[in-house]
Image (spheres, grey):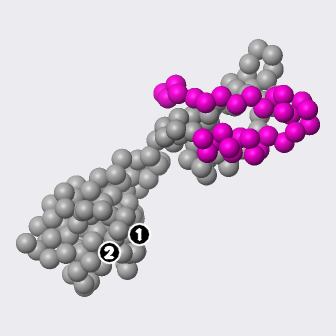
Amino acid sequence: MNEDFAELDVRPMLKNGGEPFQAIMSAVDALRPGQGLKLLAPFRPQPLYGVMSNKGFDHEVIETEGGDFEIRFTPKVLPEVQLSTDAGEPELWADPVVDLDLTDLPPPEPMVRILSEAEKLDDGDVIFALLSREPLLLFPELAKRGHQWVGNFDEARTAYRIMIRVGKAK
């Protein structure tokens, strides 16, 4: 667990009738990569949980002895991204021209569908596919055909997301 936190105590601000939202957002903007925010408040700031989740933070609430709350906002752990050895910089790839949801298909149908779609496309075209599992047998087939790929599981690890850039066999 990350133990690197900046601390912000909004109790005095609230006691004086102030609104701490801007101070909280400023504190979040000042965080170093990987750093969390420890917020001290006299109540559970539930509307803030959604705002912080959208900014990439999970939260944990601890009630202190005095009845106040310590809310620890920690950066969400992003799923590990896998990519083919020749993928280059996937963030520079074109937007997908084909979008496939193959989560309901049994193996090997997702692989067959992806390879079939790739044959119809031009070099540089991109396919996005959603799968029910990591496509371990697909990776070598893509490499053999000259395609590049990048993929990972979603945050809940219930689906594997893959983008494939069509290339030529070497």
Tell me whether the residue at label 1 lies in contact with that at label 2, contact meaning CB atoms closer than 8 angstroms.
no
Image quadrant in which the C terminus is located: bottom left
Amino acid residing under circle 1: Asp
Earlier-in-chain disc, 1 versus 2: 1
Magenta stretch containing residue 17, yes or no?
A: yes
Instruction: Tell me the tag on residue 68.
Output: none
Q: Residue at x 84, y 33 (%)?
A: 13
* SS class, disc 2: strand
Question: On the picture, is 51 further left or further right than 113?
Answer: right
- For the residues labelled 1 and 2, the Cα–Cα distance comes to 15 Å
**Would you identify the image quadrant in which residue 129 lies?**
bottom left
Above/below status of 16 relative to 79? above
Q: Position of residue 7 (x, y in %)?
A: 65, 28
Q: What segment is highlighted magenta in the picture?
A: 1-30
Does any portion of residue 109 appear in the rendered image?
no
Q: Residue at x 37, y 64 (%)?
A: 91
Q: Residue at x 24, y 62 (%)?
A: 87
Q: Residue at x 26, y 78 (%)?
A: 124
Question: On the picture, is 66 further left or further right than 164?
Answer: right
Q: Where is mark 2, residue-wise?
A: 126
Q: Residues within 10 Å of mark 2 (few under 14, many from 20)?
A: many
* SS class, disc 1: strand
Question: On the picture, is 18 further left or further right than 90?
Answer: right
Q: Residues within 10 Å of mark 1 (few under 14, many from 20)?
A: few
